[in-house]
Amino acid sequence: MLERIKYAIFLGIPKIKINITNLEKNITNIIILSNLILPYISEIEKNRITRIFTRLRKNMKKLSSGDLKLISDFLNGNKVELVGYIKTFADDILTLYNILKIYLDKSEILDMVEENPDVSVEIDENKNIYLNIVDLKTYLQASGRTSRLYSWRNIKGTIYSFCG
């Protein structure tokens, strides 16, 4: 008898929550937010960010997990010596961070971003502003995860996602 897990049920919408009031120098969040603001900024800045993304994609292929740790340490203010493509990558992330800080401080940009159906804005009791961004990759991973959840045996998964 072939057993199959048929459903992956989400309790709520899988999302990425990013604090934009106190934006951390987190590589993933900076790239996500840079992509998010692209439709709402000037053509000159769009072109600048697009060129940076091209360099990041090129250099990302070369980075090891150790390189990413060095870059993360550098971004968080630790004294780390970076050279070559690693330094270029870190400089590009810092440039994106600085662009984001300028645009995310503008209420009109935040208002436009909030109109995106995949984004919601949340403000906590300390007046921190968070962007909740739908995480589509989690939906795609659900089938693979359900295929490994049944009695430690490899069961094929079929994905039917429901949000509750």
Image (cartoon, grey):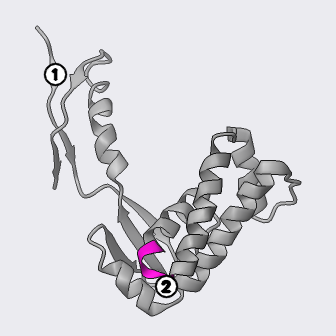
Quarter where residue 119 is shown? bottom left
**Image location (x, y in percent) of residue 111:** 37, 87
- State the residue in front, 163 or 40: 40
Amino acid type at circle 2 is: Asn
Q: Earlier in the sequence, mark 2 or mark 1?
A: 1
- State the residue in front, 13 or 95: 95
User: Does residue 21 appear in the picture of this structure?
Assistant: no
- State the residue in front, 9 or 36: 36
Quarter where residue 62 is shown? top right
Residue that protrudes farthest toward the top in the picture: 1
91 left or right, relative to 45? right
12 left or right, relative to 62? left
Q: Residue at x 63, y 71 (%)?
A: 97
Is 54 above or below relative to 50? above
Q: Residue at x 33, y 39 (%)?
A: 141
Q: Within the magenta stretch, is there residue 40?
A: yes
Q: Which residues are magenta?
A: 38-42
Q: Kindly report the secondary structure that dominates the magenta region of the rendered protein.
A: helix
Amino acid type at circle 1 is: Arg
Which circle, 2 or 1, is nearer the viewer? 1
Q: Residue at x 50, y 90 (%)?
A: 106
Circle 2 residue = 126
Label 2, residues with CA under 10 Å away: few <14, some 14-19, many ≥20:
few
- The quadrant the C terminus occupies is bottom left
104 left or right, relative to 92? left
Label 1, residues with CA under 10 Å away: few <14, some 14-19, many ≥20:
some
SS label for mark 1: strand
Quarter where residue 124 is shown? bottom left
**Image location (x, y in percent) of residue 142:** 29, 38
**Image location (x, y in percent) of residue 15:** 36, 59
Circle 1 residue = 4
SS label for mark 2: loop
